[in-house]
Amino acid sequence: MSGEGVVQAALDLAMGVLLPELEMGDGEADLTIDDLAARSQVPSRTIRFYQSKGVLPKPEMKGRVAYYGQKHVERLELIASLQDRGLRIEAIRELVLRIDRGEVDIGEWLGLEAQLQQPWDDDQPRTVTEEELYELSGRKRVGLLNDLVRGKLVERRGNVLFVPSPALLAIATRLEGAGLDLDVVMKARTILEKHIGRAAKELTELAVDRAGAADELDPAKTVEHLRPLAMEGVRVLFAHAMQNELREIARSPKVAKVSARRARADRRS
């Protein structure tokens, strides 16, 4: 199934669960908090917590007794669904307040949320045996497994091995095969993760701020177009930066020193 198909399937599933609940109306407020807890399978203490956080509408007071209705049942179901999707209570509060004010369409939000959660590549974690690991990495030498575990490219999990990123594993072992020490490769990975992570955070904040300020932008379509273009942009900019740095090094005394050391090593061998 294509990425677009996965997004649509997730959206259809979520819409089928949530929209009927949101369209049922308020209903008569005739449930005590204990009745609401029994109906929703949410403990009374949790219901009070949701009220204190502003994610649950206020009950209707009849004398000194608080009564709840169908809208409270629906809201509790919505909260549970959003928590299952990974949202924290602060994010849920912001979302339901905007829904209540008519600023957010729940169907549109679900589509955007599904789009944002789509992976940007096919590099997915794998669980493998030791033999499969050597096939995946394309190398087999004494101590390789321990070195990969130490470099956090592989994790031991009982009788199997967990590979968080098969693509990074392949890159690391190919670089080692080309003569780079695995420790150097892992230091390079740390440098890249640090700077790319910071760039991704700043670019995401920029895109979110821009999308929030421009009514004409479709956030889901923006993300769809951003994915391939951002990857290509990173490749081009990094290539230019590396080219500039290598040119600077070529004009510096460092290259002559490295060449001299290499020549002495060749003569000794």
Image: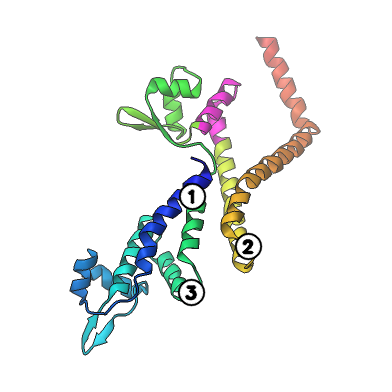
Identity, as a three-letter code, of the amino acid under mark 3: Gly
Q: Is residue 233 left or right of residue 33?
A: right
Residue 122 rendering spot, x and y as whole percentages: 51, 37
- The dot on residue 127 is none
Q: Is residue 19 left or right of residue 65?
A: right
Helix or strand or loop: what does disc 1 sit on?
helix
Q: Magenta: predominant secondary structure element?
A: helix
**Residue picked out by circle 2:** 217
Distance in Å between CA atoms under marks 2 and 3 = 18 Å
Mark toward the start of the polypeptide (2 vs 1): 1
Looking at the rendering, which quadrant does residue 73 occupy? bottom left
Identity, as a three-letter code, of the amino acid under mark 1: Val
Distance in Å between CA atoms under marks 2 and 1 = 19 Å
In the image, residue 169 lies in the stretch drawn in magenta: yes
Looking at the image, which residue sits at the far right? 251
**Residue picked out by circle 1:** 7
In the image, residue 186 sits, relative to residue 227, either above or below, namely above
**Residue picked out by circle 3:** 102
Identity, as a three-letter code, of the amino acid under mark 2: Leu
Mark toward the start of the polypeptide (1 vs 3): 1
2 and 1 marks in contact (CB < 8 Å) = no
Helix or strand or loop: what does disc 2 sit on?
loop
* Residue at the spot 51% in from the left edge and 20% down from the top edge: 138
* Residue at the spot 38% in from the left edge and 69% down from the top edge: 23
Dot 2, crowdedness within 10 Å: few (<14), some or many (≥20)?
Answer: few
Residue 139 rendering spot, x and y as whole percentages: 50, 19
Q: What span is colored magenta in the figure?
A: 167-187
Mark toward the start of the polypeptide (2 vs 3): 3
Dot 3, crowdedness within 10 Å: few (<14), some or many (≥20)?
Answer: few
